[in-house]
Amino acid sequence: MIIKDLYSVNEAIRDKEVRVIGADGEMIGIMSSLQAQRLAVEADLDLVKISPNAVPPVCKIMDYSKFKYEQSKREKENRKNQTIVELKEIRLSMTIDVGDIAVKTKQCLKFLESGNKVKVSIRMKGRENARAYQGVKVMEDFFEGLGGKAVQDKKPSTEGRMITMMLSPVKEK
């Protein structure tokens, strides 16, 4: 993975004046960038521009390689703790039977337990379009069959030939 450096370091800092923060975090003051680089060399550290948009730009004297290492460690830790929520879809029909609903409910519960959101949809065909309320009832029965293990993000609604409902897992406290 190639990461482009976001910070200007040492000789790459070409500003006339910079505000300098010491290695211990205390404010040293405003000086020319050459003086600041000299201070960094004397301390055997790097001069890093941390706030380029400030007037004058803010630079800090620090060990740049150590700073980059700690930053990459923090990013790796954040990625590790991140959860990716996927959207799964379950399709029902308006004439679905009790056994089939049980199978679909079991599958939906499996998706919800793994932390995914679920889109439940019914596609109406032919004369079913005239009785969309039956499809909404099938959706409501399906939701009741989940036994409170899901939350409706979007209630069943008819959009053209489709009836859709969005579910997400219940958050435990």
Image (cartoon, grey):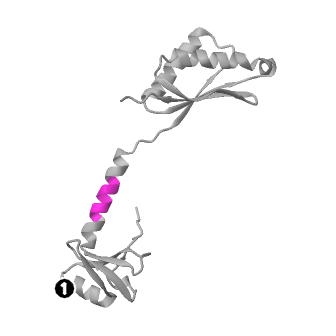
Residue nearest the viewer, comparing 76 with 36: 36
Is 97 within the magenta?
A: no
Is 74 within the magenta?
A: yes
Q: Position of residue 69 (x, y in %)?
A: 28, 64
Write the start and end of the magenta stretch as one range.
Answer: 69-76
Q: Position of residue 54 (x, y in %)?
A: 42, 76
Task: In the rendered view, tell whether residue 45 sits above or below residue 173.
Answer: below
Task: In the rendered view, tell whether residue 101 sits above or below residue 112.
Answer: above
State the SS at label 1.
helix
Disc 1 target residue: 42
**Left or right for 64, reference 142:** left
**Left or right for 100, reference 122:** left
Task: In the rendered view, tell whether residue 103 sits above or below residue 116.
Answer: above
Q: Position of residue 136 (x, y in %)?
A: 67, 20
* Residue 93, quarter of the rendered image: top right
Task: In the rendered view, tell whether residue 22 sits above or below residue 115.
Answer: below
Q: Quadrant of the N terminus?
A: bottom left
Residue in the picture at 58% in, 13% down? 100
Q: Position of residue 173 (x, y in %)?
A: 36, 30
Instruction: Determine the main secondary structure of the stretch shown in magenta.
Output: helix
Residue in the picture at 18% in, 81% down? 43
User: Given the image, on which type of amino acid does mark 1 rest?
Assistant: Glu
Q: Total marks drawn?
A: 1
* Residue 59, quarter of the rendered image: bottom left
Q: Residue furthest top?
A: 98
Residue in the picture at 59% in, 9% down? 98
Residue in the picture at 44% in, 27% down? 170
Residue nearest the viewer, comparing 54 with 101: 54
> How crowded is the residue under tag 1: few (<14 C-alpha within 10 Å), some, or many (20+)?
few
